[in-house]
Structure formats: C-alpha cells, structure tokens
Image (cartoon, helix red, strand yellow):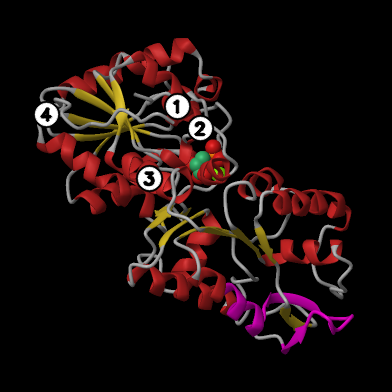
Amino acid sequence: MAGFRTIEGMDFAGKRVLLRADLNVPVQDGKVTDATRIERVVPTIRQIIKTGGKAVLISHFGRPKGKVDKSYSLEMVVPAIVEATGHPVGFIDTDWMNMQAPGEAIDDAPDGSILVLENTRFHPGEEENDPALVERMASLGDIFVNDAFSAAHRAHASTEGLAHKLPSAAGLAMQAELEALAAGLGAPKKPVIAIVGGAKVSTKIDLLQNLVTKVEALVIGGAMANTFLLAEGIGIGKSLAEKDMGDTVNAILAKAEKANCAIIVPIDGVVAWHFAENAPHQTYGLDAMDKDGMILDVGGQSIDRIKAAIDEAATLVWNGPLGAFETKPFDAGTTEVARHVAARTKAGKLVSVAGGGDTVSALANAGVKDDFTYVSTAGGAFLEWMEGKELPGVKALEA
Ligand code: 3PG
Ligand code: MG
C-alpha cells in the first residue's frame, strides 16, 4: 500500500474522537484474562485525552449475530480499561438505533473523558456495513481513529464505513503494526524466512502459496508438517494429517521450487503413543518412524536445522506453533526456536514479526513475547495479511 493517514498533527481539542479499538479480548467469569489488546490502544487514548479530546471507544465483542445480547456486553471490559489507563471510564449503553441518548451522554462528558460504547455487533448493520448505521455512528463523533488492526480484515461499519464518513486516521497502535508488517513482508531486509505451523494445510493454502513467492525459506511445522511428509511418501504412523491434501502440497512444493524458496520440513519428530501431558515419548528419525506412534513435536535435529536457517536470515515472519505446544513437553521445539529468534533479534541480527492467537500464546509460554521485533495480537487479520490480501480497514486509511 501507498501509505496511510496518521494522527500526527491532528487537533483533538474539544473533539469527540470515535476510536475503533479491538476490545474483543478473552473473558472468563466476567473478567478479562488477557488485556494485551487493551494495553495496545492506551497510547492513542492518552494522546487524545491529553490534548483535550474525548476518547469514545467503539468495538465489537464476540459474535452476538446482530442482536442485543447482554452476555456480550462491552460493559464487562470497562474495569480492564480503567486498570490499563489509570483513568475513569464511562460506559454508554446503546442498541445502535436511536443515537439521541448516547449523543447527549457524550456531549455531557467533559473534554479529556474516556467513554466506551456498547458492542457494535448488537446491530446487524455493523457486519453489513450498512450506510444508515454508519451515518448514526458518525453522528456521535467529529473524528474517526482506527487502532484495531486485528479487526481490519472485516469490512464492517465501525472498521471500514466510518473511515469514509469522518476525517479519519490510523491510531498509534495501528501505525506501529502496519510499520512492523511492512518490515516483515512489505519491503523486508532479505533473506526472509517464514515459519508456518499449526494443524491444517487446508486452512493455510493461500498463505503458503503467497509466502513461497516472497520468502527465501519456509519452515513447515505442527501437524501440517505431517501432511507434507505424507505427501512425500514418508511414514508418519498415527500422526494427525490431512490425507487428501497431497495434490495441494505438491502444487505448493512446485511453486516454491520455481520461486527458489527452500521448504524446510522436519527430519525427526518427538513421538508419543497417546496424547496427554507428560505422555511417554521418544524421538525418531523420519526414516524410521514408529508405525503406532504420533509425532507431537519437532525433534532435536530438526530444531538445529531450523536454527541454522534462521541464522542465515535477516527477517523472520512466524505464524503457528511447531508442535502441540499446549501440552507439555511438546512445547519444547517451539520454545527452543522461539528463544533462538529472540536472541538473534536482541543481538540486532534479525527483524522478527509474529502473529496469530496460538503463536502469541506459544511465545508467551516460551517467555519471549516481548523479545521479538513485533508481535501482532491479530488472528484472522494477520493471516489475511500473510496471504497478501488487502485489508479493508487498512485500505480505508490509505493516504
Ligand atoms: C479477532 O478476535 O480476531 C478479531 O477481533 C475479529 O473478530 P471476528 O473474527 O469475530 O471478526
Ligand atoms: Mg476471531
């Protein structure tokens, strides 16, 4: 993309700033269990209120399917915003039909206030990007700032429509994210290595097809590596794999070869005979796999090979764990590689960008979440970016 509008030089004094955040955070028993997405928007909130604007946060939360359903109320998230900002936060209830009461509540709040509006997905017009809803939303603000990269793959009223209706710009979190992503795949320092893991090839076909044309080396891990091995005729015992993906894998391999992208699949695996925490396990070379076992993690030789490939790269992009990292000790491969990436990054040798829900948990599990150049909190949006797709919420902010 050409470049995008930022909040630099925007005058917020006395203005109602509709700030699209991604408050779609994990909640358990009514409490936010991971406030990372909230913490990321705090700098933009501070900037708005410090310069005399009103920060009016708008977001979806869960998938209430266009109906008012208080089990998806954003009111639950308010205490976590208070905690992250150290500032009082007002909550404004609305079903997004009649904007008079919400409008008055916003007008009555003093400059420098932080307010949160109810879940945008309580109205079906949000996901339909309905111009009538966009109009009503726009009546509540003077400026639109989008700080929700993780929702930017949705062309919804609050992510896309509003950007055309009000003076609009990327917030500081969105800006940091777009700059990091540009350094990852947009105009990266070469050579670039990508690590893609996770369960299924079938959900990542577009991503793999795109990556092989953009990177010099592609590491395949997780259960999707089993599908690659199977397609090459390698015995994988009882390992999880997609048996009908052989043609797809071969097409990806052919495309990679044409583009001079090295595909790195595991050469050994940590095998167990049942899937449970601390299940008995043993490492096998893939030329001698046990036919009753299942591969749950990459083995030591594979790890060494991946680390050596990383040492040759200047940029790394990572999505998806290398093994069944949620069940110990099958997190070991992911953890060792993640720590290696962190060390290379700290040493100034590598630009490292990672994203996706599981990936962030795996990096947190490895204790290196803050040691990559950038870790995206986006799930679907990060994948679509890796697929090379244009994200509507970003496109709407183009300069
Ligand atoms: C996410 O959690 O990935 C974003 O908030 C988008 O949510 P959605 O997948 O429900 O649109
Ligand atoms: Mg999601």
Residue 324 located left or right of residue 36: right
Check disc 4: other Cα within 10 Å, few if <14, some if 14-19, many if 20+.
Answer: many
Residue 31 located left or right of residue 324: left
Which image quadrant is residue 104 in? top left
In the rendered image, residue 282, in percent from the top left (x then y), is placed at 73, 89
Q: Quadrant of ligand 2?
A: top right
> What's the residue type where badge 1 is placed?
Lys
In the rendered image, residue 268, in percent from the top left (x then y), is placed at 73, 80
Q: What residue sits right under mark 1 in the picture? A: 395
User: Which quadrant does the N terminus fall into?
Assistant: top left
Mark closer to the chain start, 2 or 4: 4
In the rendered image, residue 341, in percent from the top left (x then y), is placed at 45, 70
Which label sits on residue 177? Answer: 3
Q: What residue sits right under mark 2 in the picture? A: 391
Write the residue at 43% across / 38% down.
73
> What's the residue type where badge 2 is placed?
Leu
Check disc 1: other Cα within 10 Å, few if <14, some if 14-19, many if 20+.
Answer: some
Q: For residue 124: magenta?
A: no
Which label sits on residue 111? Answer: 4
How far separated are the C-alphas under marks 3 and 1? 14 Å
94 or 244, which is in the foreground? 244
